[in-house]
Structures are given as C-alpha cells and as structure tokens.
Amino acid sequence: MTVPAAARSVALVTLGCARNEVDSEELAARLEADGWTLVDEPADADAVLVNTCGFVESAKKDSIDTLLAAADLRDHGRPQAVVAVGCLAERYGAELAASLPEADAVLGFDDYAGIGGRLRSVLAGTPHVPHVPSDRRLLLPVSPAERPSAAATTSVPGHGDLPAGVAPASGPRVLRRRLDGGPTAPLKLASGCDRRCSFCAIPSFRGSFVSRRPAEILDEARWLAGEGVRELVLVSENSTSYGKDLGDGRLLEVLLPELAAVDGVERVRVSYLQPAETRPSLVEVIAKTPGVVPYFDLSFQHASAPLLRRMRRFGSTESFIELLDRARALAPAAGARSNVIVGFPGETEADLAELERFLTLARLDVVGVFGYSDEDGTEAATYDDKVSPDEVQARVERVTRLVEELTAQRAEERVGELVEVLVESVTGAVEGRAEHQAPEVDGSTTLLGAGNWQVGQLVAAVVVATDGVDLVAEAVAGSGR
C-alpha cells in the first residue's frame, strides 16, 4: 500500500546506549527536515524505525523482540513498515534481513544521510537490497591525523553534514531533534574506537576513532542549553582519546571548561574513560573544574593482570587503585563506576579472586557485572579454555552478590554528605540525581523537605538514608536554582 505524502509519519524506537540516543535524534532531524511527522507511538505511525543495539547477546535479543513487536502491530493495520537501523542492522546487514523477514528493510549507517527517501521507498513497496557488512575500520586511514578530511566522505553517525534548509547559513548548525525533553542530554564527542580488545566487536561496525571538532560540540551544547538542558553527558566509545586525530591528545582538558561555561549548562559529565589513557591532567580537570562533575566512569573490565593481557587490555589492581586514589585526593566525594566481565576464556579461580579483591578495595558507587559470551569476529571467540555457560552464570551471580553488598556500603558512606540534586521528576516523590549518579545507570536520589521543586532545578541536600545504591536526601532550606 502506498502512503500519501501528506500522511507520512514515523516513530523512532531507541535501544542500547546513550550514543544510540544521539544517533536517533540525528535521524529525527533528518526526517523532520524531509517533511516527515514524528510521533511517539509505533501504532500511530506509517513507519517505525527501530534503532537497534548489537553489543551483546541480550541486547541483540531485545532488538529482535522489539522489531517483532512492531511487526505484530503492522499485521494489525498500523504501521505499514518496520525498519531496522543502528548497530545490529549495520553489523549484520543482509544476514539480519534474511533471518528476519518480519522487518521490511534493514538499513546501515550509509543510509542515514538519505533516510527520508529510504523510508519513502519502503512504504511505496520498492524492494530494498540490504548491505553486506564490511569492517568499517578500513574506511578511514590508519593514521589518526589523516582522518579528519577523509571522514567528510564517510558515513559516521553523529558527524553528518546538514541537509539544505535545516539550519541557517550562519550560527549553530545542529543536526539534531530532541526526542526527550528532560534536563539531561547526551552529547557525542566522537565515534568509533582504535582499541583492539579481544572480546569487543564494536570497532568493526562503528569504525575507527573520529573526533568531532570542538566548535561543532560547543555549538550543539549551546543549542541543547537553549532546549532546557542543564546537564550534558559527554559520550563516545572512548572519551579519553578525544582530540588525538585533531592534533591534540589533551584537547578534552581544554574543551571541558569551555562546555562548563556555556550559559544555562550547570553540569558536564564525561562517560567512557579508558583507565590506560586516563592521564593525570585529565583527572585534575574532571575533579577540579567548576561545573564539571567529579565523576569517573572507568572501563576496568577486570583486575587480574594476566587476564587483562588476554583481553588485550592493560592494568592491574594496584594501578587501578592508584588511579582512583588520585581522583579522590583531588575530589574526596568523587563518583566512580565501572563494568566488569567474568567467565572470560581462561579465567581461573585466582583471577576471579583478584577481581573480588579489587572490587573490595575500590569503593565503587556502581558496578555492572557481565558474563562473557563469544562475539562474532572477535579474537576471544577463537580462544581455547572456554568457561562453561553454567559456570559463567555462577560467577556472574557470585560477583553480583559481592557488588551489591559493596555498593550498598559505599552509598551508606555518603550519609551526612552534602549533595546537589538535579530534579528529574516531581510526580509523587521528588526524584533526581546527585553529582555521582549518571542518568539511567547509577541509581537516583529521593528529595525530602518542603519546596515547590521543578524539573531541572538543582537543590542542595544532605543524605539521610540509602536503599541499595539509591539515596534519600533532605533539602537544605532555601536552596534551589
């Protein structure tokens, strides 16, 4: 059935990380500029665009289930088309299309610039030939210094040129349309990754590391502030590499104070730090710059030095604790979180015990515990000494129990601490986040006390109780801005 041009509407469903949220908002801007009407509910749309995640097995399953649910709606009359985009679509392309006929099309990153036309073709019933995936690292020069000019002709989500008519010839040229009106927004620093962790497939489908230019990032920060955003969450696959392809490996230290000075922005938070690249100068800027929250999202993954080498990573319990100590010497109340993988091929009882020793010493606010599973095309998938799935699950449960105890203890240490809460919800209880709590992943703070609090306000409060990693805090009389 051909849908009349005047009736074209589209719903975007976003799965996965904050980087995908930015990509969805880029797609939304492109579609709106091309005359599409954006709607919230798939059942109200002519086309549904599912921005998938292809990171780990559970995320892939969620993406497939979401596509199937949208296809089920289509079979009952609305929408007319269900289209997969995002990491799963880019990673598997034609293979995904063949195995999931319920999706009307599978589009890759190269389709983003012309997304409106692609959707019109799908709705018109024109068959779409899905792409055959290739290693996107090969699309850019090996030398980071040669990438900026080459990136202009390569499809990199979040780095696209504006189509004619989207923005004025002068002034901020932001290719983005907010899909969530809250006081916090992710802001993309860069895309891709040059690291070669043996368990991770992300570089193969996201490509080599490419920084956005500072002026572009600052323009977008000002635009977001104008949209009511008070906290910027800087995201990328590896924020510590920012600027290396622009000729300055310490450019993040320069950019952070400039972002914090943007009128209307009260907090800047950096995510996705690689411990091996987290230099002392960056630690100092994050810990001491007014407006930059002292928050360290460090990708430790494990703490056993021999196992980390098998992961193609670097570090140890001692070096990681030294890094945390350095941050806390500058900002004693600094937040720190990480993710760890258990059950990696060859992981021994001694390796697991070393990870538990590190977690006990580290006093992290939040830890994500993931069980290892083979990822297509990765080096680790070829390793011997695999841990059985049942044992992987047992180790996940064991480390999760320890983490829950340790993070609850860390939260209790904050009782009596003065925090500043960014209000995010005033329906019923007033909920928000303290400086050490990133959105979605780090728990929340319930605000007590009299006050006509509004979403987006920052309220000084004293922590009076905890519930796991969540806090309860009493507002300081007269505070709120």
Image (cartoon, rainbow, N blue to C red):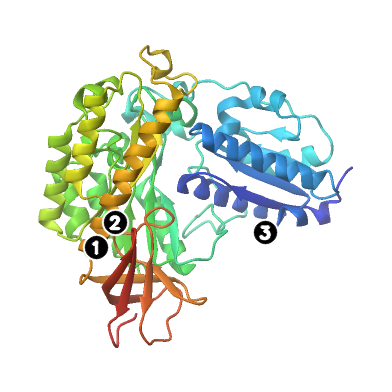
Badge 3 element: loop
Q: Residue at x 32, y 50 (%)?
A: 404
- Which residue is tagged 2? 408
Q: In this figure, what is the number of numbered marks?
A: 3
Nearer the observer, disc 3 or disc 1?
A: 1
Residue 19 appears left or right of 359: right
Q: Amino acid at mark 2?
A: Ala
Q: Residue at x 56, y 34 (%)?
A: 60
Q: Residue at x 37, y 11 (%)?
A: 384
Q: Position of residue 18 (x, y in %)?
A: 46, 49
The quadrant holding residue 131 is top right
Badge 1 element: helix
Badge 2 element: helix
Nearer the observer, disc 2 or disc 3?
A: 2
Other residues around mark 3 within 10 Å, as few (<14) / some (14–19) / many (≥20): few
Quadrant the C terminus occupies: bottom left
Q: Residue at x 73, y 35 (%)?
A: 103
- Which residue is tagged 3? 40
User: Which of the marked residues, 3 or 1, is nearer the chain's N terminus?
Assistant: 3
Quadrant the N terminus occupies: top right
Q: Is residue 210 visible?
A: no
- Which residue is tagged 1? 412
Residues at marks 2 and 1 touching, judged by CB atoms closer than 8 Å? yes
Q: Position of residue 412 (x, y in %)?
A: 24, 62
Q: Is residue 239 visible?
A: yes
Residue 41 appears left or right of 291: right
60 over 185 or under it: above or below: above
